Every structure is written in C-alpha cells, then in structure tokens.
Image (cartoon, helix red, strand yellow):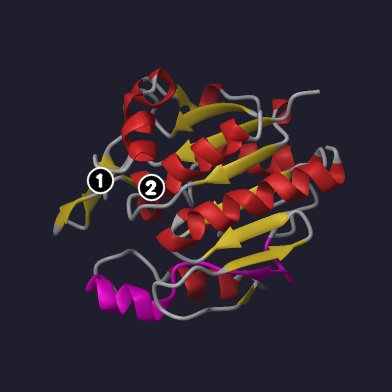
Amino acid sequence: MTKRVLIVLTSHDDLGGVEKTGYYVPEAAHPWEIFRKAGFDVDVASVKGGEPPQDGYDPADPAQAAFVAAPEQRDTARVADVDGSRYDAVLYAGGHGTMWDFPDDPDVRRIGREVYERGGVVAAVCHGPSALVNLTLSDGSYLVAGKRVAAFTNAEEELRGVADVVPFLLADALTARGARHEPGDNWQARVVVDGRLATGQNPASAAPLAERVVALLAERRV
C-alpha cells in the first residue's frame, strides 16, 4: 500500500515586527521531493489554508522552484480540515512563523497525535518542533517527554539575531516538556531519531531527516 505523508506549514508571516517570515521553503521542498521519489503520496496543509507565506526561497534550486509552483503548495488544505489518521507520517516544516502559530493550534497538535497513536512517524525540522511543545497524547503526556530531540538551538537563534524577538527559545521549551535536546554544531545537519519521533536541527537537516522518515516507514511498514 502506498504510504501517505503530510507536510504541515505555518501561516504566520510576521517575525515579531522585525521582518517578514513564513515557512522556510527548502525545509518543505526537499522533503517533498524525497517523499515523492520514494513513491509516497504527499499532501500539504497549513494553519489557515491557502497559499502560505514563504521565507528563504531560492528560485535557483529546482526542488524549491517545483514545490512553490505545485498546486498543493499554492492552495494548501487547512489543518482543521485534515484527518491525521489517514497518514503514515507527518512532517512539521520550519520557518520562524511556526513559533507563533504551531504551539497553540489545536489541530496542529491533533494531527501529530493522530499520526503517532496509529503507529505512524512524527517528524519536525528546525523550528518545526515548535509543534511538539504542547503536543500531548491521549493519556495527557507530552509526546516529547523522555525522548531525544533535535531543534533549532539557542546558539543558532543568537547567531540569527532574533533570540530576543521570538516568543520563546525552542530548545528550552522542549526541554521544559521533558525532552532531551541534543544539539549539534551550528548550521550543520543534525538528525535525531527516537522510536517514531524524528527531528532535525536546522535547514541543512531537512533532506537527511526526510531520508530517515523514508527508512522508518520502510522498516515499520505502518
């Protein structure tokens, strides 16, 4: 049976009044390309639906150009209308916008819970793990509690110059939920897999994270 993967994007476009933001295009485009090459059916959703705001777009990258032109990116489903139980995996793509609308959106959390509790894979990259900060399972426990994770680090936030602009520091918030945050070198690919939870640290981690998701789905046959 063909695997189904959902990529979830932010709909928030304001980086604390400092600059415009959105989802970070390569963090969605490269996994989208990898999943499609693996033969998966790939859907895209965003918090508000429609065409989500973009950040970091490089039109010279064929994968990014193909993704932003794809119908599923130009008219995303609204997460409130998505049935997470239909998917074998969900990937929360990053971009600073996620820090504002992912953590408290009930449907962003619901989709992750539905995927995970049916035996699927939950993945998130860079700021995408902001979706995991408040994600609880049916028993009320935090999904990340006791699990090893990667996410955009405090040091990278400082280097980006917005540590005092974002509403919280992602690594600290995950740690507060009981996660074991395991940072790698700044801007270098870092992927951490703990069971069916797969996370990546930064934009360089998006493609290797997607490859790990492919491998997990092949191993578990969910």
Is residue 152 magenta-colored? yes
Q: What's the residue at 52%, 79% (across, down)? A: 184
Q: Nearer the viewer, residue 31 or 117?
A: 31
Q: What's the residue at 45%, 72% (across, down)? A: 188
- The percent position of residue 53, horizontal first and vertical second, equals 27, 37
- The percent position of residue 4, horizontal first and vertical second, equals 68, 28
Question: Residues under labels 2 and 1: Cα distance?
Answer: 8 Å
Q: Amino acid at mark 2?
A: Pro
Where does the N terminus fall, quadrant-wise? top right
Residue density around tag 2, few if under 14, some if 14–19, many if 20 or more, within 10 Å: many
Q: Is residue 13 visible?
A: yes
Q: Amino acid at mark 1?
A: Asp
The label shown at residue 47 is none
* Residue bounds of the magenta highlight: 144-162
Q: Is residue 186 left or right of residue 12?
A: right
Q: Is residue 169 left or right of residue 190?
A: left
* Secondary structure category for the residue under label 2: helix
> Which image quarter: residue 52?
top left
Q: What's the residue at 80%, 51% (across, down)? A: 139
Where does the C terminus fall, quadrant-wise? top right
Q: Disc 2, disc 1: CB below 8 Å?
A: yes
What residue would you read off at disc 2? Answer: 26
| Residue 165 drawn above or below residue 28 | below
What residue would you read off at disc 1? Answer: 58
> Which image quarter: residue 145?
bottom right
Q: Is residue 91 left or right of residue 139?
A: left
Q: Is residue 131 visible?
A: no
